[in-house]
Image (tube, rainbow, N blue to C red):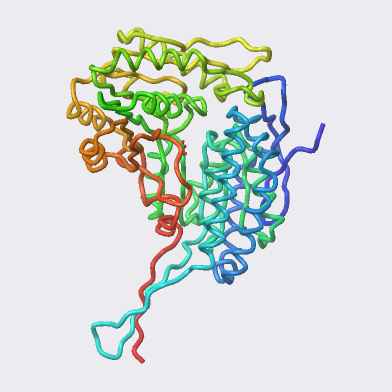
Amino acid sequence: MPEPKMNLIDGAWITGETTPNINPSDISDVIGHYARASADQAEDAIAAAKAAFPSWSRSGPLDRHKVLRAAADEILARKDELGRLLAREEGKTLAEGIGETVRAAQIFDFFAGEALRLSGEALPSIRPGVGVEITREPVGVVGIITPWNFPIAIPAWKIAPALCYGNTVVFKPADLVPGCAWALVDILHRAGLPDGVLNLVMGRGSVVGQAIVDSPDVAALTFTGSVPTGAALAAKSAELMRKVQLEMGGKNPFVVLADADLDVAVDCVVQGAFFSTGQRCTASSRIIVEEAVQDAFLARMTERMSALRVGDALAPDTQIGPVVDENQLNQNEGYIEIGKAEGARLVTGGERLKRETDGFFQAPALFADCTNQMRIAREEIFGPVAAVIPVKDYDEALAVANDTEFGLSAGIATTSLKHATHFKRNAEAGMVMVNLPTAGVDFHVPFGGRKASSLGSREQGRYAAEFFTTVKTAYTLA
Ligand code: UN1
């Protein structure tokens, strides 16, 4: 058996209790064994990050640039191997896994550049002879807690800006996908980060996550995951007066107007609802369709969906990989039953699929005749399940799109400039897509939502500086 992969605390690889990392396409395939940190080890990691902060926060831009640049280069050079590891541990297809790995490299590349562009403002005071300088300073120890559905891109888009702006990090990846997290930390460690600047504490949320959340030494906390966990984190962070950034659920609408190019609409819905097995907070799960085109839309969707190849994430012709684990699959199946019981019509899919290997395969499911009040239209399922809601016109479509507790991404398929423009202005979401899927975003522009989807400032691009720095205004009489 290969050596278990360990946690990185203060520049040293530290072992402990281990857990197997299982391939959801084939549960007999054990990818490796990974350490699970104890609460004490998480506290050691926080102490190490605190001790490393004074020096790293004063490091020069070129030192930070070099580490981020080296990480970007190595991730890109190893994209096939890391993409394969990602597909093997999470269940995305190989193409999706490689794509996500390239995106992680691009994110490090972007922040390697940002490290060389750190700047401030100098302006005159209203008092003669006095000058004002406005600068951004790092916040301190940043706690980073990431989900299983983007095992390398989400860690990248939190770790890269944290380091770029001079913070030190305690990183806890999701228990289901330690492989990519470990590989990323190994790359950054070898790229020359001083001891304690980046600490990896793999393990359980209830142990490791809790230790990070409860620590007054964690100055800022960034989290992507579920709404209940996010709410608990926000409450504790308020008590500690700590900066917090949360990315949580979505129930993202995709509107199909009667004037839409139906090929574009079907493409957007198939990609947005079912690719990555529907396991994206940006997934389209409410498909709001003008009655005039509903039959034509459903006919094309059924045809497209029957041709989708669901199977082993690593097989070259697979388009949709397995669900991440047994729990998630059971939950998805539960929602299929809930939808039927609520009176929605299951057009296609939903059933568990048998493949050569023992894995968590499910046929993508489409419900029609849904109302926006049904649980399948209100609760985030986080699987390959979408609900079609008929509406009579654009105004009703917009009202239904906005009638949700979430507000991450919203899409529309239309050839009307008037409706596209109106939708962009009036969709209550952080991201709006016109003739594009709700999921699949660029790495260099802000990412985030409204209402129960997000709390705090935006992730990604230059907007990330808002969370990972604190502003100082200095006055000098000279
Ligand atoms: C994307 O759609 O490209 O957890 C990104 C998620 C999001 C990322 C989605 N935070 O699904």
- Out of 303 and 370, give the one closest to the viewer: 303
Q: Where, by quadrant of the figure, is residue 361 drawn?
A: top right
- Out of 315 and 62, give the one closest to the viewer: 315
Q: Is residue 49 above or below residue 154?
A: below
Q: Is residue 448 above or below residue 219?
A: above
Residue 289 is situated, as x and y percent measured from the top left of the image, at 28, 22
Residue 71 is situated, as x and y percent measured from the top left of the image, at 64, 54
User: In the picture provided, is 32 more to the left or to the right than 337?
Assistant: right
What residue sits 40% from the left and 54% below the top?
Answer: 243
Residue 32 is situated, as x and y percent measured from the top left of the image, at 73, 32
- Out of 192 and 169, give the one closest to the viewer: 192
Q: Quadrant of the C terminus?
A: bottom left
User: In the picture provided, is 4 more to the left or to the right than 52?
Assistant: right
What residue sits 49% from the left and 54% below the top?
Answer: 218
User: In the picture provided, is 235 more to the left or to the right than 210?
Assistant: left
Q: Quadrant of the N terminus?
A: top right
